[in-house]
């Protein structure tokens, strides 16, 4: 018995990093998975891995900078699997860490589109199916940036704080309809996104190491499964204690 047997999961950002690890774990736990992204080659490699656990999985090609593409990705998933039980909004991009006076308006728009508007639109498209069936799970991936500053510029910080606010409102609106909504906020995780970010940042983190995508995926499984059914509207920060903010202990 898998923890997600028979559930349909729509996974944005599922072709790399934390989203890939989550897609694989969900499939291993019995979910039918739609991986959304732009890179078909990477997606096919992930679908191949899923064959090891006999998972039903598809790749849905979409560019989240385009609203129609987001709508189409939901429709394609429902056309294939019949419904959506779990929506995982995990795609995202960083900004340049620049101060506001050096940040282009176009970069602000791009980051907000990817990190905030895309999850909003995907949710808007998916929610009618969840309401109709009286159940569903939505997991939004924010960041430890929602508990500290200086780990992005104003576009990234605004997008991730916005995602937490949106999730809290969604929890209020959708809880009575049977839909569980939470934020999962990773700390510094070893993924393609952090390849160019120095892990000197972790000097003040008690665990002193980056997290692994698989460690975040296990929490995403917990939030998707019935094990977390009384957890609703929270921002779960999983950062190895980084945002505790203490000085290093000798
Ligand atoms: P990643 O770069 O591996 O994943 C980002 C995903 O977003 C990729 O799959 C990418 O294809 C997708 N994406 C980007 N632009 C897209 C577009 N236009 N259309 C469709 N998909 C697009 O990095 P990751 O670390 O796995 O990031 C996953 C999430 O975790 C992001 O939301 C990120 O902000 C968040 N996060 C990561 C860290 C970290 O340290 N790695 C820390 C905090 C939060």
Image (tube, rainbow, N blue to C red):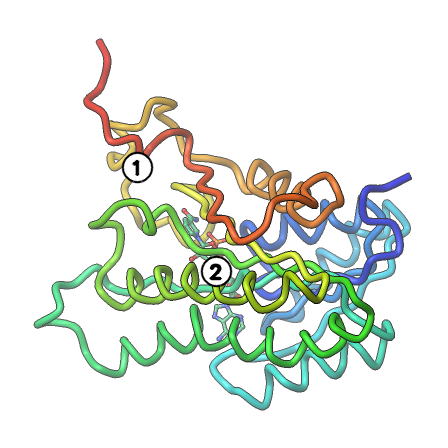
Q: Which quadrant is the N terminus positioned in? A: top right
Q: Position of residue 74 (x, y in %)?
A: 70, 79
| Image disc number at residue 168 | 2
In the rendered image of this protein, does residue 179 appear above or below residue 241?
Answer: below
Find numbered disc 1 in the image and state the secondary structure of the residue it sits on.
helix
Q: Which residue is mark 1?
A: 199
Q: Which quadrant is the C terminus positioned in? A: top left
Q: Residue at x 58, y 50 (%)?
A: 232
Q: Residue at x 69, y 50 (%)?
A: 224
1 or 2: mark nearer the eye? 2
Q: Position of residue 161 (x, y in %)?
A: 35, 60
Closer to the camera, 85 or 177? 177
User: How packed is label 1: few (under 14 Cα within 10 Å), some, or many (20 or more)?
Assistant: some
Q: Is residue 166 left or right of residue 243?
A: right
In the rendered image of this protein, does residue 116 appear above or below residue 216?
Answer: below
Residue at the far top in the pictured view: 250
Closer to the camera, 248 or 198? 248
Q: Residue at x 53, y 53 (%)?
A: 233
Residue at the far left in the pictured view: 101
Q: Is residue 52 left or right of residue 131?
A: right
Find numbered disc 2 in the image and state the secondary structure of the residue it sits on.
helix
In the rendered image of this protein, does residue 176 appear above or below residue 193?
Answer: below
């Amino acid at each position: 018995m898998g923890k997600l047997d028979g559930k349909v999961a729509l996974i944005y950002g599922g072709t790399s990093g934390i989203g890939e690890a989550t897609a694989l774990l969900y499939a291993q736990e019995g979910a039918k998975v739609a991986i959304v992204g732009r890179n078909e080659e990477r997606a096919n490699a992930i679908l191949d891995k899923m064959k090891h656990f006999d998972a039903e999985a598809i790749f849905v090609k979409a560019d989240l900078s385009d609203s129609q593409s987001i709508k189409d990705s939901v429709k394609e998933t429902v056309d294939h699997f019949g419904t959506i039980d779990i929506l995982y909004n995990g795609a995202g991009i960083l900004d340049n860490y620049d101060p506001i006076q050096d940040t282009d308006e176009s970069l602000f728009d791009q980051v907000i589109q990817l990190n905030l508007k895309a999850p909003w639109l995907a949710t808007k498209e998916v929610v009618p199916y969840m309401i109709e069936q009286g159940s569903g799970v939505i997991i939004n991936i924010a960041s430890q940036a929602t508990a500290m500053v200086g780990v992005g510029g104003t576009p990234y910080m605004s997008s991730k704080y916005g995602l937490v606010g949106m999730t809290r409102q969604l929890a209020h609106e959708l809880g009575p309809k049977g839909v569980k909504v939470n934020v999962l906020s990773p700390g510094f995780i070893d993924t393609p996104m952090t390849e160019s970010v120095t892990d000197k940042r972790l000097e003040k983190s008690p665990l002193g190491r980056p997290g692994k995508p698989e460690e975040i995926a296990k929490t995403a499984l917990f939030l998707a499964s019935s094990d977390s059914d009384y957890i609703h509207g929270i921002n779960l920060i999983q950062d190895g204690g980084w945002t505790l903010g203490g000085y290093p202990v000798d």
